[in-house]
Amino acid sequence: MPAIHSSEFGQLNYDESQVFLFPNGLHGFEDSKEFLLIQREGLAPFCFLQSVSEGGLRFICLPARVIDAAYAAAVEAEDAGELRIPAGNYAADCRDVEVLAILTIPEEGPATANLFAPVLLATATRRGRQCIQFGSSAPAAHAVSWMVA
Amino acid sequence: MLVIRRRAGEAIVLPDGIEIHVLDISGSRVKLGVVAPAQIPVLRKEAVEARQQNLAAAASPLPDTLSAWAQAYREEMAARR
């Protein structure tokens, strides 16, 4: 069984079938093309995108539905081709696609969630992509009211 | 900001072999063509902003308060049921 050493989570054994392929990586991290979705007991609904190739790279995330139950992510043709799913709007609580918001948690000040560039994980195709919501008013730094130090 | 009016089919020229062509205008959208040397990255501004957000997010330390936040959220959800 392959394993990676995560700076945050220590040794992680995983199965290839658990990997999400990001053909273009994430913005700013284009070389990291494989991620694992990590969940930890006691930390739900928080979850983590851990890079397979870079042990030190991980993103703290929340499912978008936790932040806004009415949220939906637009998947345009380019996104759809990469995720190998039909283009369209994917509600935050849809079954086939996990819609995640990446969190930025500064040492001081409020934690924010990026709803302008959500990460979509297609469970059937094991593909992932950060889908920028062009033309949307969804905020890139949405303050999460219950995440205050 | 320099403001220049251009029609479809017209272009502006910048130094170092960069040209920005207005290819088509329809409704509220404009289709641009960019001619630039291969080493000049051409990015949508939103992608640059997403990059900056991601860099800050990846550098965010895992806060000690995460489990407390998680618990508070779960309790709130349980209370709503």
Image (cartoon, coloured by chain):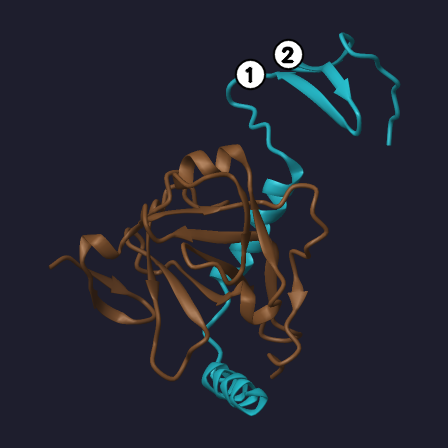
User: Residue at the top extreme?
Assistant: B9
Query: In x, y percent, where is residue B51?
Result: 55, 47
Q: For the point 55% across and 37% down, which residue is it?
A: A76
Which quadrant is the C terminus of chain A positioned in?
bottom right
Query: In x, y percent, where is residue A143?
Result: 67, 69
The foreground one among B2 and A43 is A43
Residue to which mark 2 is pinned:
B17
Q: Kindly identify which numbered label has been placed on residue B37.
A: 1
SS for callout 2: loop
Q: Chain of mark 2?
A: B
SS for callout 1: loop
- The answer to whether B23 appears left or right of B61 in the picture is right
Other residues around mark 1 within 10 Å, as few (<14) / some (14–19) / many (≥20)? few
Other residues around mark 2 within 10 Å, as few (<14) / some (14–19) / many (≥20)? few
Label count reads: 2
Query: In x, y percent, where is residue A66?
Result: 55, 71
Give the residue type that dot 1 points to. Pro
Q: Which chain is brown?
A: A
Badges 1 and 2: C-beta atoms under 8 Å apart? yes
The foreground one among A53 and B22 is B22
Give the residue type that dot 2 points to. Gly
Chain-order first, disc 1 or disc 2: 2
- The answer to whether A40 appears left or right of A103 in the picture is left
Query: In x, y percent, where is residue A64?
Result: 55, 63
Q: Kindly identify which numbered label has been placed on residue A17.
A: none
